[in-house]
Amino acid sequence: MPKRIQKLGEIAYNLWWTWHPEAQRVFQRIEPVLWEEVYHNPVKFLHRVPRQTLSDAIKDRRLLDAYDRAVAEFTLYMSGCDNDNDKPWFQRYANAWPTHKGPVAYFSFEFGLTEVLPMYAGGLGVLAADHLKEASDLNVPMVGVGFLYLQGYFRQRITEDGWQEADYEHLDFEQLPILQVRDEAGAPLVLCVELPGRCVRFNLWKAQVGRVPLYLIDTDLPENTPQDRVLTQRLYSPDPDTRIKQEMVLGIGGVRALRALKINPAAWHMNEGHSAFSTLERAREMVKQGMSFEQAREVVRQSTVFTTHTPVPAGNDRFPKWLIDQHLTGLWNELGLTREEFMALAEDDGAFGMTPLALRMSAKANGVSELHGEVSRAMWQWMYPNQPVPISHITNGVHTATWLARRMRRLFDEYLGAGWYARLDDPATWQLVYEIPDDELWAVHKHLKRKLAQFMRERARAKWVTHSQHPVQTIASGVMIDPNALTIGFARRFATYKRASLILRDIPRLLRILNNPARPVQIIYAGKAHPNDEPGKRLIQELYRLIKNADTAGRMVFIEDYDINVARHLVQGVDVWMNTPRRPYEASGTSGMKAALNGAINFSVLDGWWREAYDGTNGWAIGEDRAYDSPEEQDRIDCESLFNTLEHEIIPLYYDTDEDGIPHRWLQRAKASIATIAPRFSTRRMLKQYVEEIYAPLVHRSDATSNEHLVGEPMQA
């Protein structure tokens, strides 16, 4: 790197850039075509950019000014200050714990930090990443633990017949914004987890998320057996034998990784039950030091929180007990338990349940929305006969800076007052949205819609030149989208309960709405079904076959290979965000929060977060806030509600414009959406709530957690 811009290397290896678009634009200015070719990966970019291009860059005064601003902001941020030189929130929080007590250890099976690191399958991973980013912004002591997947999540390819096919690509870790963790001798750190007759060895890689480190486990080592090397190959193996070994490596190996790094957490947070074996490993350490299991269990409980995201019993991991016998024989002896006592820790209707284990080993547990909390308490009531179920709720949020369009942020900078971002969870901050002139808000929104249309056209062009796509698929990918027409977005996992096909119950009515020459409507779909979810894949096929039909006139679109980059363009560029889950199976949902930040208006079933957010002025509801007698009744009522609201409220409001083409009444609703949703459904509010209601009470009420600091060194290979 030329000395004048050598700090770009440091910025490239800190995922701070993922929520600072001005830093990304520095790389883009150097070589815009290459920046797109490497799919916004700054490490790969710096590996490939010609030296002469860098030499030319340092002669560009505007580029250097942008570089200097980015470096100054990054340096100030990493020094532990906010941009206004004030201390971050946690340092000003009255009940903050001292740093010597350690960070919160946050375990998750997936992290959706950026499209560059495809270590996520959906909302769970994106939420986990937003959690770490907000911890960095607030300077909450935190460390993340997860997996580094060799093949990431699959790349989606849709055939001409609409069938989803999965492609897997091997990631080159040296080209990613991660660094391998090394021991004191400079060699890659190698740790291990015992499995029957062998030890699974693993390396660690570090992704720096602003001020928060994220450690990622990698078992793809030559000294491991082939079946052990693939444990960190792909997300969510459907094979129970592989899955239990993955969860052992995440939970047990994650604890050992933190011990090897001499990180002693003050609290432990399990994001879903996949890492619940971590509680048994921590208890085993203390029993080995002389505690009884009950003493060790209480120490573990008093420093542990479990967040459940699954509102249906079938979605929680359960293993047959013979599989536990096969892989965990001997652990109950190390814990001082009989086999029966050990199995009772996770008893779940004759199986070994990871959620019951997590609940029994945690002092705090929460769902991710108010309704999901109610559903979770009912679902797990059998564990707590004749007593309240200890599951509260903290509704999810989104990391504002990650999902807010750059143009929209500049508008907020102008009208929300200096330092608004530091006050983004204060509802009063957002009342100033109503002061934004309609013509300015509409101009930004129209720009973002044009940007989305251009994005779809360029993706279609790139696919077309490969000669691998039928012409009708090119039409289906969005080349005929009109940025001036009312555009609805629907993007999420294609699980059947999300009812992507609800609108297909009345196709003639749908086609009349789409093709109204005076008031046309467009619907853009995106999303993946799990590779083993045959009903989900059939749902995509059913939808895709209609999209290809010429009767839709190119006004229904399916964007292939949904990822964070596609999501960013969609939530920033649509007018309406539609969500049709079968209530009450949407634990929370967060995509609608991201869309609302950017001026889109939500149109959703009253489930998850939207049940709390909807107030009659900030969007539209599909169906009613009640339980239904049958799925068929719910589908019928929700479908009728969807079409009636769309025809009689949404479409007329959008096309009610003045002589300059500005829909003032629409923009009033858009402003109400921003003002009511942005502060309440941000990770700023969410993480403060975790700190105030869960993390700080756990750390302060139990000095016994310090006993965990006395454990021995982890087993190294």
Image (spheres, rainbow, N blue to C red):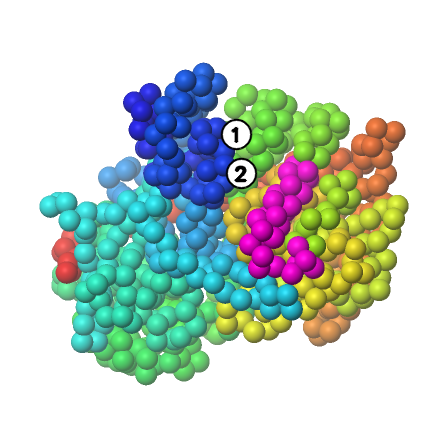
Which part of the image, by quadrant, shows the C terminus?
bottom left
Q: Amino acid at mark 1?
A: Tyr
Q: Which residue is mark 1?
A: 421
Task: Tell me if 588 is positioned left or right of 191 in this view.
Answer: right
User: Which residues lie in the magenta part?
Assistant: 448-474
Q: Is residue 471 magenta?
A: yes
- Residue 200: horizontal and vertical position, in percent? 22, 66
Q: Main secondary structure of the magenta part?
A: helix
Q: Do we see residue 249 in this rendering?
A: yes
Q: Which residue is mark 2?
A: 400
Q: Which residue lies at the image location 60% right of the left edge and 73% below the top edge?
A: 535
Q: Which residue lies at the image location 38% right of the left edge and 35% below the top edge?
A: 49
Q: Which residue lies at the image location 61% right of the left edge and 48% below the top edge?
A: 461
Task: Tell me if 183 is positioned left or right of 346 in this view.
Answer: left
Q: What crowding class fits label 2: few (fewer than 14 Cα within 10 Å), some (14-19), or many (20 or more)?
A: many
Q: Nearer the viewer, residue 320 or 232?
A: 232
Examine the rendered structure and indicate whether residue 694 appears above or below residue 373: above
Examine the rendered structure and indicate whether residue 204 appears above or below residue 403: below
Q: Which residue lies at the image location 31% right of the left edge and 77% below the top edge?
A: 324
- Residue 443: horizontal and vertical position, in percent? 71, 30
